[in-house]
Image (spheres, rainbow, N blue to C red):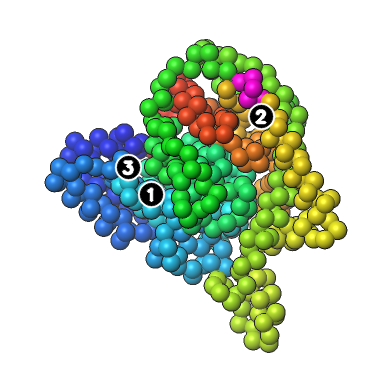
Amino acid sequence: MNFKFIRNEIISGNASVKEIINDYFSKIDDLNTKINAYVCITRDIAESQALEIDKLIQNNEQLPPLSGLPIAIKDNICTKGVVTSCSSKMLKNFVAPYESTVSSKLWSSGGICLGKTNLDEFAMGSSTETSVFGVTSNPWDINRVPGGSSGGSAASVAAGLCAAAIGSDTGGSIRQPASFCGVVGLKPTYGRVSRWGLIAFASSLDQIGPITNTVSDAAEILYSISGKDPYDSTCLDKPVPNYIKDLNKSIKDLKIGIIKECFDHPGLNSEVKESVLSGVERFRTLGAQIIDIECPRFNDGIATYYVIAPSEASANLARYDGVKYGYRSDSTSNLLDMTSKSRAKGFGDEVQRRILIGTYALSAGYSDQYYKKAQKVRTLIRKDFDNAFEKVDILLTPTCPTTAFMKGDFVNDPLSMYLSDLLTVPANLAGLPAISIPCGFDKKGLPIGLQLIGNVLEEHRILNAANIFEIDAEVIKNKPFF
Ligand code: GLN
């Protein structure tokens, strides 16, 4: 259910917030064993939040903007008093002592916390298969992955187990699962949204954003969670525009750049290509100007990302030493042995692989060859985008080279898994906002996503174009399980 529908129910008195969330909880009871989208349900919190909003309604008081909307939070975002596990054995028993800025903004805007969603361990992955809680299923075909790392968030929205979910996106983890699950996923500009309380993966890339049923729901959430935060010095002190206001503006004469390199890539599935190109034609019919753009470094994004992200991860994950918090091995021989055994047993294979790659790339003698070189290529990628935005307003690509793949397809083939981030990582490397919206289905009935990338802090432009497209195309007529 989208926000509009739920809001109407509540405001018209058709249903109380308590009744709405009870409906969601019974759906979760029915489906979560199949989908495994939630790793933890926060019924007590939801019930007391619902009571507050129901009281405001009874007393005819003014309602905050997200009043009564049931929201799920990716389990790498701290929620006070609730386990925040990162889907890792390392943090399986970690109860967050504080609330993240994003979630506290949602609750003070009237949102209701339904629970925490599954992810690839420490948000490293593209399939939600590396979670200590087991794999999440794609609601469109439960034998397939939902994408990752915010697979639990995307699957919970697609299966109707929440009205919206929050994800994090370091290299595509909001947009790629949104694309695989046929929902909307928005990664904001780097610094638009506070990361206070997000468990760090790669700090120069991480952003938090919404996964929703509709573009306008994403705009509403973005509006509520954006803005300066004294707890996060990387968070921008820039005014937050009303993202909802311009959603329906005509896109006549909007200049959309088509990144040639993406469409020429041999890894791009032909059905995905065809569907996204028909999306391009729809934009043309809606009055946009379509312009071919060259971004010669776009396809170098993946190699660049897979040096920078593991390097930063190796530094960020150094804090899990078995001493301060997290899993501790029972080794008693000495401190070094205890620490190394805690890390070897507490982290899964993919996380250890990233720590090893990152430590190697940063080590004396190799950092010029790998890390510094990657930083230089990152600057070139950003320059390509800067040049492109001199000619066009927004850019368009497919979100992913393929539709959802089968569970197990790439678990033993990390390089192929990494390739599924080909089209999403450049926006993270350049710090740009990007959104994935459904644009069609392949012959197997699996959703296909189209990505719009905007210039820095131009979320309003991509949201506007995405909204006009969504209304015109009506891609998702029936949801899975309905
Ligand atoms: N799939 C990418 C990775 O494995 C992106 C992850 C993310 O955005 N958190 O690193």
**Foreground mark, 2 or 3?**
2
Relative side of 295 to 203, left or right:
right
**Magenta part of the protein: which range?**
388-392
Reading the image, the residue beneath label 3 is: 66
Reading the image, the residue beneath label 1 is: 105
Identify the residue shown where x is 40% and y is 55%: 115
- 149 or 134: nearer the eye? 149
**Foreground mark, 3 or 1?**
1
Look at the picture and state if 63 lies above or below 321: above
Mark 3 or mark 1: name the one nearer the start of the chain.
3
Identify the residue shown where x is 44% and y is 42%: 226
Q: CA distance from mark 2 to mark 3?
A: 35 Å
Amino acid type, mark 2: Asp
Relative side of 440 to 116, left or right:
right
Amino acid type, mark 3: Leu
Q: Position of residue 410 (x, y in %)?
A: 68, 49
Q: Position of residue 68 (x, y in %)?
A: 28, 45
Q: Quadrant of residue 443?
A: top right
Q: Quadrant of residue 100?
A: bottom left
How packed is label 2: few (under 14 Cα within 10 Å), some, or many (20 or more)?
some
Q: Is residue 154 magenta?
A: no
